[in-house]
Amino acid sequence: MKYLFVLLSIFFTQSFCAQYNPLSGSIFYKEFSKVHTEYIAKAYVAEQILTPTGTPQKFYVDAVTAATSGELTCLVYKADGKKGLLFGFWGKKVNENGLLINQYSFTHLEYERALKLLESLEKILADNFQYAVSDEPEQELIIRIEDFDFLIHLDHTPVLRVIWNGFDSEWRVSELKRTKKRLLKKLK
């Protein structure tokens, strides 16, 4: 009986004293969700890509892929003759007071630049696949494309780390291919 009381008191103490995001709606809430990123990205498109005027403007934003880590979400946008790919980065950073806080940032590429970036990454992966399955101990590549540094760990299932503006996110090859496929499909 004592053990049951101790276990229950630990559980209840933890749930009452732990940090909880009241906006989450559930204790199983993912901190970096695709839906939340899409919501914030709409404001980014409205303020940074479009020029608000006195007349209504239609635009479209869709989160096409999210990295399994949740730290990188790719979104497509179409607005006022402009179209492209948004990268939404989430992560913990140290602020000016030394506190670790959640931060996010967006950057965008126009359609042609985004397609070129995705095709370049696919070509790099294809050209270096033999290197990945060799017995070489060094199986890492680093390349800068646009404003992004890509650290690629070559293995039987390569993994890309996208480094941009202090954010460091993991991106799987399947997510890269899905992003390209949906970019082509949604922005024909």
Image (cartoon, rainbow, N blue to C red):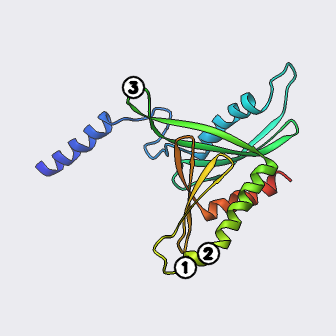
CA gap, disc 2 and disc 1? 7 Å
> Residue 135: percent from the left, percent from the top?
48, 81
Of mark 2 and mark 3, the one earlier in the sequence is: 3
Considering the numbered disc 2 on the image, is that residue within a helix, a strand or a loop?
helix
Type of amino acid under label 2: Phe
Q: Would you name the residue on which mark 2 appears?
A: 129
**Residue 86 as seen in the image, left or right of residue 37:** right
Q: For mark 1, does the 10 Å Cα neighbourhood hold few (<14), some (14 to 19), or many (20 or more) residues?
A: few
x 21%, y 41%: residue:
9
Q: Would you name the residue on which mark 3 appears?
A: 97
In the rendered image of this protein, does residue 94 appear above or below residue 167? above
Asked if the residue under mark 1 is in contact with the one under mark 3, i.e. CB atoms within 8 Å, the reply is no
Type of amino acid under label 1: Val
**Residue 180 as seen in the image, left or right of residue 128:** right
x 85%, y 18%: residue:
54
Q: Would you name the residue on which mark 1 appears?
A: 133
